[in-house]
Amino acid sequence: MKDAIGILGGTFNPIHNGHLKIAKAALLECGFSKILFMPNGNPPHKQNNAIISSFHRYNMVKLAIEGKDGFEVSDYEINRDKPSYTVDTNRALKKIYDCPLYFIIGADSLYTLKQWRNYEELIKECRFVVADRHCKEGNDAQMMCNKLSREGANIKLLQMPEIDVTSTDIRLMIKQGADTSRFMPASVCDYIANNKLYL
């Protein structure tokens, strides 16, 4: 997959070391030419006021990947004025990048893939790499990948290091005044403190 690009979308609210681990694992295991971090602008599945502005989330991703070879950030989705769906994003990016594109998703998303917009078109048009991590939605990601592959999906399971934190955990820790420095790059911690985010 050396000419392919891995796309890691997410709210990144905030970005943390777990996201960076997923990206690094995908870059190394799949041999992507680069990983494109794509913060959601208006995620259709997450409508709540806990999501801070896309401006801050984009800046934190930019800081987190600064100086890391093979990592880039895209503002494509945050510049859209309506919800972004993967099938539409894939079609738009194909016009920009003349190479195979792989969407990197978590195991939690794997189990709910059939609920995504235009599922039948999605699995025909999009390629997926799944970060196998513990989630409440299911406990056999390989079996689910095999099942979706039989339905026509182009999907690969990524062997993942253990991730011990979520963005939700970090937001709660910040609100409680706990130290989050071991879960995020120092530049992101400083940005959150300087802008008084998640208090």
Image: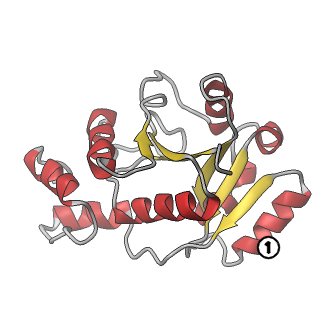
The x and y percentages for residue 39 are: 43, 41
The x and y percentages for residue 17 are: 35, 64
Residue name at image x 70 percent, y 40 percent = 100
Residue 126 in view in this figure: yes
Q: Secondary structure at mark 1?
A: helix
**Quarter of the rendering containing residue 186:** bottom left
Which of the two residues, 75 or 134, is positioned nearer the viewer here?
A: 75
| Residue receiving disc 1 | 143
Which of the two residues, 4 or 49, is positioned nearer the viewer here?
A: 4
Relative to 113, 57 lies left or right? left
Q: Amino acid at mark 1?
A: Met
Q: For the C terminus, give its image quadrant.
A: bottom left
Residue name at image x 11 percent, y 48 percent = 196
Coloration mode = secondary structure
Which of the two residues, 14 or 45, is positioned nearer the viewer here?
A: 14
Residue name at image x 49 percent, y 39 percent = 43
Residue name at image x 50 percent, y 76 percent = 161
Relative to 148, 180 lies left or right? left
